[in-house]
Structures are given as structure tokens and as C-alpha cells.
């Protein structure tokens, strides 16, 4: 082996070692980096719009981050206010809760004695056990809330560091992300092939990320308006919760709608319970999935629903919430590679047919 080849082998080993070491020392912020990249990608249309107005990258990026930060602060303040109010009410509502539970159990016992007399003895035993369990609900919830607050307070410095790094990453990704990507492409061989791959990748990522997240946000907005009209407390906060759960394909908005419906049926507010269930089925499930999402995805790549389901759901069981970023990125990359290969095969077939004709 001559000295030149030896040098290149040593250089490769050193480069790989440095890359591995860099990933190792950065592993605590890998999740933060991934979320920042996703946020920057989702905010890029708004950044581009503001850039056309301001003609300044730094000002446009700051405006975008300021808007997001303002929304974030408003949501946090609203959540803390609602949590403080409900915990205060909960701590003083033990007797009211006992009264509701006693009324419910009395209704069940009376119904059983009248229509199912053979099960009355079992109903009485279950009622006693349920009363004992219900008497511990409020203290248990308060203890759990205290533990959660204590855990959050202990990890506050870490969360603040991750938040600060995330803000800076989003700021610089909005400004220089496109240039960095273009420069990286210039360093790659087979630029024409890479360009074809990116042509397939962009609409796929648009469909998997932009369309999916916009649909979830619109679902949350519809939920907030509906809850406001139905007289539900904290409609905006519940709309945000609906938007978050809409991101999870296997969970969905029904995780909120069904317990909410059951709650109002238990307190004998049957009209509102049925209204919430009807509203959830029509406006939070059927309309977003069958009208909003297809219209938003008209100009995007057609992606089979099974791929979308696997992309967002499967990684959650392996890597947690960051799977919302990693899953669609990986599935979209593979789908783009597959479609690029199909295009190359079709192009080769056309070239062969033209060669035969000539």
C-alpha cells in the first residue's frame, strides 16, 4: 500500500471516529435537534412569506419565532391557570364527588333490583367496593399532581437548556437551512439522480408532515369552536389537547371525546353528552379525514393510508414521541427511493423502446 492510499485510509478512520464521538457527546440533544428540524420545516412556509415582505432573513426568522413563542406562552399560562383552578376545586369537592357517586350507585342499584333481582346482591358488593375506591380518587390525584410538579421542577434546568438550544437551532435553520442543503447536494456524486430523488422526496414529506400537521391543527381549531358553542369549560385548552391527540393515529380524538361524553352522561346532562359525541364523530373524525386532508393533499404525493399509519404509529412504540419525527422521515425516504427507482426503470424502458424504433 503506497503512502497516498495509506493516508486516505487513515483519514477515513479518523473521520468516522470523529463522527461517532460527535454523535456520542451530542446524544442528550439528539431529540431536541430532531424536533427543531421538524419545527423549522413546518415553519418554513411562514418564514418564506415574511421574507418576501421584510426582505431580511434575520428579521423574518425572529418574527416567526416570536409568533410561536407568544402562542406557546399563552397556551402555558392558560394550562397553568386551568390546572390551578381545577386542583383548587378538586381539593374542596370531595363531598360533591361523593354525592354524585352515591346518586349513580343508587340509580344502578334501583335499576338492578327492578329488572335484574338475581344480580342485586352482586351489585351491592360492587357498590361498596366502588365507594371505597372513589373515596381515594381525589387524594390520589392530588398526590400524583404534586409528584408531577416536583419532577418537572427538578428537571427545569435541563428543559430550559433544551428549549434555548431548540430556539437557536430553529432560528439558524430557517435562515441557512436551504443553503446548507444545497451545498451538501453539490458535494454529492450523481447530482442528476439526487435531484430526481429530491423531486420525489419533497411532495412526500409535504404530505406526511405539512398536510398531516395542518389537518391536526385545523381539527383542534374546530374542536375549540365546537366546545365554545357547547358551553364546555376551557374550550381553547381542550382544542389544543384535541390537536395533540389527533397527531397519534392509534389514539386519535376519540380518546378525548368518548370520556367527555361519558362524563356528561354520568352527571345526567344527556343533551350535551350526545351533542359532544355527534360533534366529535362528524367534525373531528369524518370531516378532517375525508374532506380537509384530501383537499390539502391534492397537490402532494399520493401516499397510501397504511404507509401514513405505520409512519406515525409504529415508531412511537420504539422511540417514543420522537417517533412522530423519525417515522415519517424514514418511511418518506424509503418511499422516495422506491419511486425514484421506478422512474429510472421506466426511463430506461422508454429509451430502449426509442432505440428499437430507430
Image (tube, helix red, strand yellow):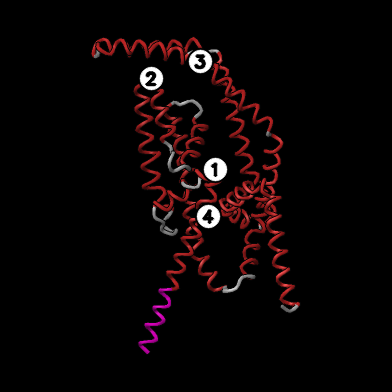
Distance Cα–Cα, label 1 vs label 4: 14 Å
Q: Are marks 3 and 2 in contact (CB under 8 Å)?
A: no
At x 58%, y 30%, the residue is 78
Q: Residues within 10 Å of mark 4 (few under 14, many from 20)?
A: many
Q: Are marks 1 and 4 in contact (CB under 8 Å)?
A: no
Distance Cα–Cα, label 4 vs label 2: 43 Å
At x 39%, y 79%, the residue is 350
Magenta span dominant secondary structure: helix
- As displayed, is residue 78 above or below residue 127? below
- Under tag 4, what secondary structure? helix
- Upstream in sequence: badge 3 or badge 2: 3
Picture quadrant of residue 44:
bottom right
Query: Which corner quadrant holds the C terminus?
Result: bottom left
User: Which residue lies under the disc numbered 3?
Assistant: 136
User: Which residue lies under the disc numbered 2?
Assistant: 266
User: Which residue lies under the disc numbered 4?
Assistant: 329
Q: Residues within 10 Å of mark 2 (few under 14, many from 20)?
A: some
The boundaries of the magenta stretch are 345-358
Amino acid at each position: 500500500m503506497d503512502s497516498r492510499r495509506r493516508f486516505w485510509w487513515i483519514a477515513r478512520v479518523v473521520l468516522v471516529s470523529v463522527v461517532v464521538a460527535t454523535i456520542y457527546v451530542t446524544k442528550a440533544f439528539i431529540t431536541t435537534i430532531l424536533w427543531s428540524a421538524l419545527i423549522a420545516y413546518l415553519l418554513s412556509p411562514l418564514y418564506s412569506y415574511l421574507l418576501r415582505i421584510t426582505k431580511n432573513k434575520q428579521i423574518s426568522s425572529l418574527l416567526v419565532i416570536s409568533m410561536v413563542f407568544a402562542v406557546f406562552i399563552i397556551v402555558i399560562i392558560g394550562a397553568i391557570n386551568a390546572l390551578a383552578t381545577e386542583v383548587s376545586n378538586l381539593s374542596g369537592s370531595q363531598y360533591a364527588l361523593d354525592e354524585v357517586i352515591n346518586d349513580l350507585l343508587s340509580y344502578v342499584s334501583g335499576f338492578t333490583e327492578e329488572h335484574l333481582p338475581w344480580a342485586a346482591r352482586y351489585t351491592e358488593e360492587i357498590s361498596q367496593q366502588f365507594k371505597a375506591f372513589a373515596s381515594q380518587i381525589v387524594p390520589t390525584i392530588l398526590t400524583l399532581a404534586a409528584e408531577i410538579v416536583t419532577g418537572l421542577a427538578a428537571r427545569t434546568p435541563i428543559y430550559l437548556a433544551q428549549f434555548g438550544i431548540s430556539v437557536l437551532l430553529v432560528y439558524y435553520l430557517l435562515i441557512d437551512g436551504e443553503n446548507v442543503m444545497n451545498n451538501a447536494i453539490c458535494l454529492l456524486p450523481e447530482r442528476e439522480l439526487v435531484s430526481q430523488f429530491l423531486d420525489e422526496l419533497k411532495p412526500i414529506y409535504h404530505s406526511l408532515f405539512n398536510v398531516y400537521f395542518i389537518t391536526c391543527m385545523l381539527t383542534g381549531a374546530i374542536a375549540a369552536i365546537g366546545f365554545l358553542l357547547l358551553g364546555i369549560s376551557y374550550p381553547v385548552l381542550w382544542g389544543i389537547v384535541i390537536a395533540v391527540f389527533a397527531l397519534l393515529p392509534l389514539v386519535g380524538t376519540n380518546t378525548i371525546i368518548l370520556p367527555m361524553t361519558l362524563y356528561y352522561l354520568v352527571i345526567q346532562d344527556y343533551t350535551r353528552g350526545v351533542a359532544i359525541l355527534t360533534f366529535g364523530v362528524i367534525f373531528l373524525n369524518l370531516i378532517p379525514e375525508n374532506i380537509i386532508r384530501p383537499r390539502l393533499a391534492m397537490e402532494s404525493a399520493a401516499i397510501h393510508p397504511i404507509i401514513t399509519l405505520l409512519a406515525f404509529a409504529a415508531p412511537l412504540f420504539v422511540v417514543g414521541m420522537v417517533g412522530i419525527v423519525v417515522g415519517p422521515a424514514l418511511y418518506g425516504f424509503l418511499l422516495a427511493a422506491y419511486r425514484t427507482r421506478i422512474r429510472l426503470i421506466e426511463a430506461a424502458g422508454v429509451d430502449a423502446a426509442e432505440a428499437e424504433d430507430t
